[in-house]
Structures are given as C-alpha cells and as structure tokens.
Image: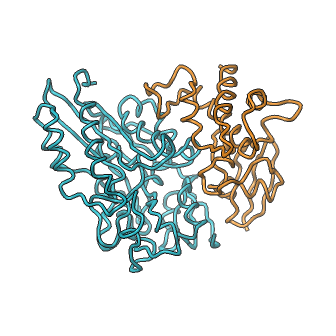
Amino acid sequence: MKSFDYARAADRTDATAQASDDAIFIAGGTNLLDLMKLEVMTPDKLVDINRLDLSEISVTDDGGLRIGALVTNSDCAADKRVRSDYPVLSRAILAGASGQLRNKATTGGNLCQRTRCYYFYDTAMPCNKRDPGSGCQALEGFNRIHAILGASDACIATYPGDMAVAMTALDAQVEIEDSAGNIRLVPIQEFHLLPGDHPEKDNILETGDLITAVILPPPIEGKQVYQKVRDRASYAFALCSLAAVVKMDGDTISSAALAFGGLAHKPWRDEAVEELLIGQQPSAELFGKAADRLLAEAQGYGSNDFKIPLTRRVLISVLKEATQAGAAA
Amino acid sequence: METTELVINGETHKLEADSRVTLLDALRNHLGLTGTKKGCDHGQCGACTVIVEGRRINSCLTLACMHDGDTITTIEGLGQPDNLSALQSAFVAHDGFQCGYCTPGQICSATAMIEEAKAGWPSFVSDDLEGPEELSNEEISERMSGNLCRCAAYPNIVNAIRQAAGEQS
C-alpha cells in the first residue's frame, strides 16, 4: 500500500473542506482498503468520516425513511421499519457480502463501491476505468461477470452491489452535501453513470461532495421481491439480480418497478418494460414480451452471453412470484 | 505515525504505528496477539475476524488508526485453555477443525453471530424477515459464509455452533 496522510473529520464541514482530488473519504473502508492494498486506488490522503453524526435512521416528514450515510448494512437490513415496509431492501442487503463485511459497510460507502471487473483489479492490465485511455481488456478477454446492457467500447464493467438495486426499485434519493454546505437530492437512478467515454467516473459525485443520507419514499404498496443469481449460494456477487415492487389491482398489474443488478454499469431500470406490464393481466405471453423488450438491445461479449437468457428467466420467475394470486401483501 | 489507544480484551494498549497498519497487523505484529490469523488479507476468508464494539469484522480491512478508543475482543479474550468458552468447548467436542488455522476467526465470528441471531437479525435464508426461531444448519451456514475452512470441516463447525447456540438460548 502506498503511504497516505490520515485525518479524522470532526464534522461535515470539516470533512468536505478536507476533500480534494487526491483525498478520499473513508467510512467502512472494506472496498477502499482492498483496492489500496492492490494499489488500484492510491489516494494521498484519507479523511475518516466515521465519527460524523450520520448513523441514524429516522422517519421523514412525509412518512418515508432517512437512512444516514454511516448506517451500516447490518443495521439497515435489521431495522424493523425497513424489514416491515421495505423488505426488498432488507433482502437485497442480506443477499450481499458476509456478516463481517455488512457490519462495516455503510449506506454511503456501499453506493460508491467499485466494479469487480478482473482487469480493473489487475494493475498489470490496461483498464479505462483505472487508467483512462489505456484500453479495455475485458472486451475480448474474460468477461463472464460483465455488462450486457448500457456498456460502451471503453468499458463493459458492472456495478456489483445489491443494496442500490433495491433502492432503485424503491425510487430512493441520495442526499449530498457539497463543500459550500449546500444539500441536494439526487434520484438514485441518476446517481450512478453509464460508462460512455468516461468509465473512470462511476457516479455524479464531484470533489468535496459528501453523501449524507439515502431517503426512501413513504411505504409503497405492492409485493416486494429480491432475487439474486450467483455462482455460489452465499457471499458472491450477482450475475443477475432483480428487485421488484409490483402491485396488483384484482387480476391486473397496476404498478411495477423493476431494477436489475449485475447487468450494467449501474442498477438498470427500463420504464418501457414497466409500462408494457401496467394495466395487463399476468400471463406467460406478457412476461415473455417484457423480457423481449428488456433485452432488445442486450449484447454479450463471449463469456457473458449466458446472462441474456439468464436475465429473461429471472424476470419471468420474479414476475410470476410477484403477481401470483394472494401476492397482494 | 499515528497514535491510537485500543482496549483489547479488557486491557488498554497504546499503539504508535504508520497509518497503513491494519487492525490485523497491529494485533499480530505490534501487540503480539497472534491468535488472530492472516489468511487472504482481503476480507474473503474471515480468518482475521475479531469483535469490535460488539460487532464481528474483518480486521484486515480496517486501519488500526480508525479505532482509537474502541473495545476489541480477540480469540485470546474469549477463553483460556483451562477455561474455554462454550463455543471453544463445542469446537473441541465436535472436532470442528483440521489444521486449525481458520478456527480463531470461526469462533470469534460465531460468538458474535449468535448474538446477532438473538437480537432477531434475519438472514438471506430466513423465510420471514422477523427472523428464525432457531439457528438451523441452513441459517448457520448462511450466517457463517464469510468464514472459509480450506480443510472443509464445515459439517463439524456447523454442529459445534448449533450446540453452543442451543446451550445459550
């Protein structure tokens, strides 16, 4: 690991004031320190934000939840309000990492976790995300875990997390404070970026921006499901995951929010697929059409070709579960 | 150099170390507490698991200087050869190891995991998010998936944990 200066931030103003292009906030640190050991990330300074007052889950004025950026994944998944009103979020968090990691990983840090692309992790290889302009070795290399949607010629990496996928289906917002003390809310769908020509940029955060919370809307009616497919039964990243919030009105689908993990550089949501389902009665034909629409522009790169039929099956399976009779709750 | 005070197994230690020193390296190399093991050093194997402020964590993926004032329990703090903890006794009774390298991490992890279950935390395999009635084999396997055993003593590890959890419930 390269040497760095360490500073503990006293409060939010102190934290954002200490931020610079070469300084990184550290919270749980489970991903950052891993990457620093491998010298994939080499910050000159770490600003430790763990002592900031951002560890509470509180009810918002409109009846939603404000999850502080330093709330650990364990505490968020175990929170009684999250378990009862946003079960898809508890399920998604519990589907990720291990008990030890969830005890350290934070809500804000988890949003910022970086791709698990093998070439990003291997400093002997070119990678446009780690070293802009050097090329992408995954395009024609081993790409089993890589994107099938929204990728670019510069990068086919995926966002690896589970938590943000559920938050995307729940229409959460990310609360961010900048170094001037201004607070803004960003819909989580706009937080992560597609790779385009600048895969080095994972998300919209600018220097000095500090994630302070994730805001969940008031409890949403409908059945909530999180399904994750991976190479082993526990402690593995998603090859494909789906967070679904589906409401039935009698035997008709009245609303559907579907967010996919493991398929793209960000949690993937396709409004056209949701619109195709709304107002319709569940059927194998309808679900097949939804999968056709979702995957119309999907592209495999060799070893990840299997993700296209896999995603179709995951979507159909989850829609069946979410729309079956008696699934209203 | 960073100055950090750590309360380990009830004893206060003052550490002077480079900011890069992980909690794991501080325990083993600076403080001589070698019960905690280094396996992968990347959070994948769980051999380095210790209990910090009541929570099990991977000591390899956190910096010692981030823990100023924290209370830490390592395997040395859980029991002694003539006074084993319930889990340590159960691991002996069930032969829950072969080479033993992962065992301190397994026992620290399971000690805290049993408390998590008692607090009603659900897991990925819980049918009901309100949590399971008891720690079944399936629940134990899921909750312990962050601890690898390359000798594959898993069946006996699960039996040991199930026995200890049952005795404590």
Q: Which residue is at a point 63% across and 66% down the rendered structure image?
A: A6
Q: Is residue A284 left or right of residue B75?
A: left
Q: Is residue B159 left or right of residue A63?
A: right
Task: Find residue B79 and report its horizontal and vertical position in percent.
Answer: 81, 34
Q: Residue A268 or A173: which is nearer the viewer?
A: A268
Q: Residue A313 or A177: which is nearer the viewer?
A: A313
Which part of the image, by quadrant, shows the C terminus of chain A? top left
Q: Is residue B15 left or right of residue A100?
A: right
Task: Find residue B107 and report its horizontal and vertical position in percent.
Answer: 71, 37
Which part of the image, by quadrant, shows the N terminus of chain A? bottom right
Residue A322, quarter of picture: top left
> What is the residue that sits farthest to the right in this orientation?
B82
Q: Residue A245 or B43: which is nearer the viewer?
A: B43
Coloring scheme of the render? Answer: by chain
Chain drawn in cyan: A
Q: Is residue A96 left or right of residue A167?
A: right
Task: Find residue B162 and report its horizontal and vertical position in percent.
Answer: 64, 25
Chain drawn in orange: B
Image height of A33 relative to A262, above or below:
below
Q: Residue B55 or A298: which is nearer the viewer?
A: A298
Image height of A182 relative to A218, above or below:
below
